[in-house]
Amino acid sequence: MGTLDGRVAIITGAGRGIGREHALLFASEGAKVVVNDLGGSPDGTGADLSPAQSVVNEIIAAGGEAVANYDDVADWDGSQRLVNTAIETFGDLHVLVNNAGILRDRVVVNMTEQEWDSVIKVHLRGHFLPTKWAASYWREQAKSGVTVNASIINTTSTSGLMSNPGQTNYGAAKSGIATFTEICQKELTRYGVRCNAIAPAARTRLTATIPGSEERNAERETQAEELGFDKFDPANISPMVAYLATENCPIAGKVFFVYGGAIHLFQPWTIIDSIEADHRWTVAELQQQAAKWGAVTFDQSIPL
Ligand SMILES: NC(=O)c1ccc[n+]([C@@H]2O[C@H](COP(=O)([O-])OP(=O)(O)OC[C@H]3O[C@@H](n4cnc5c(N)ncnc54)[C@H](O)[C@@H]3O)[C@@H](O)[C@H]2O)c1
């Protein structure tokens, strides 16, 4: 008996890295998996069918069920074909893991239009479109009297939630995905859909693009040998995602930071201090009363 027996899941960007680990774990837990990946390079250029196909081959060789899909998650028709692939191949859809992503890091003053647009497109539009088509399917089912028990798991990042310099495009998209998750939860709960997001940290080809990663990886390999546990193995992320996908999981509208053996729960934007007047503020009054916020600092350290 697997924890995901009978569940049909789409995992985007599942040809490599974290998504690949999700696909392998989901299949070993009994899910039927649509392995989506267009097979581009880390900056999103190019295409290659082999990463998605090789994950499907691996799942089938291990006795699981999977089908490949090579569509661009940020493409209107392609993302609809992706959702239809699950329904046409496996007869239903229960789980959507939005994971596909790219990076084009640059400080804001040097960022090009192309660098901004491509990253915003793959992440934000690439979360929106598969969600839209999957949610449309679940709404139709709910309206026709079927009891829907569906789960969407999105992929945000501490680069956004904790504001990493050099990544305004990626960070803005990833913070947007956290808010997208919260709003989707409020809209889709009526159809039986739960929405959550995870911010992972793991060694993949995306983190290999960060300056200094070679030295860090060498240090981490030594640590892993000493500990007997590789905290940066991308497979560490997948159990929480699989748990959020299970039929009886009670969690909805939450964002987690997942890394190694640690799972941290975020709280959404929260008001922590206020000033109030019974009239419209004057600038002079604000100079008196609002200046205190200049001294407020926030803890944005990432517990790695
Ligand atoms: N690795 C980390 O530490 C880390 C940290 C925070 C967030 N993330 C996020 O985790 C997710 C997975 O990243 P990863 O580190 O495994 O990177 P990765 O490059 O190993 O995997 C991403 C996969 O997405 C695919 N992809 C990219 N654009 C696509 C598109 N338009 N349509 C379909 N597939 C597409 C790529 O071909 C690739 O196989 C991303 O959303 C990333 O932003 C990763």
Image: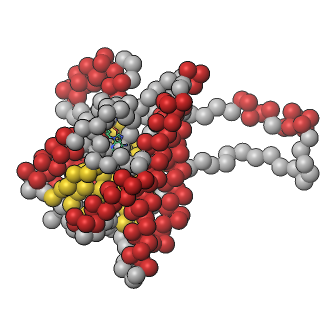
Question: From where the camera sits, is residue 164 visible?
Answer: no
Return the x and y of residue 294 as percentages of the image width and height.
Answer: 73, 30
The foreground one among 32 and 111 is 111
Question: From where the camera sits, is residue 88 visible?
Answer: yes
Q: Quadrant of residue 84?
A: bottom left
Residue at 22% from the left image edge and 42% from the top image edge: 49
The foreground one among 95 and 130 is 130
Q: Residue furthest bottom?
A: 145
Residue at 29% from the left image edge and 37% from the top image edge: 47
Return the x and y of residue 74 as percentages of the image width and height.
Answer: 42, 47
98 relative to 1, above or below: above
Q: Quadrant of residue 6?
A: bottom left
Q: Would residue 145 be found to the left or right of residue 70 on screen?
A: right
Residue at 44% from the left image edge and 43% from the top image edge: 123
Rendered-image quadrant of the C terminus = top left
Q: Would residue 57 be found to the left or right of residue 4 on screen?
A: left
Color style of the picture: secondary structure
The foreground one among 217 and 167 is 167
Return the x and y of residue 240 as percentages of the image width and height.
Answer: 32, 51
Q: Would residue 30 be found to the left or right of residue 234 on screen?
A: left
Q: Quadrant of ligand 1?
A: top left
Q: Residue furthest front?
A: 77
Return the x and y of residue 270 as percentages of the image width and height.
Answer: 62, 49
Q: Quadrant of residue 96?
A: bottom left
Rendered-image quadrant of the N terminus = bottom left
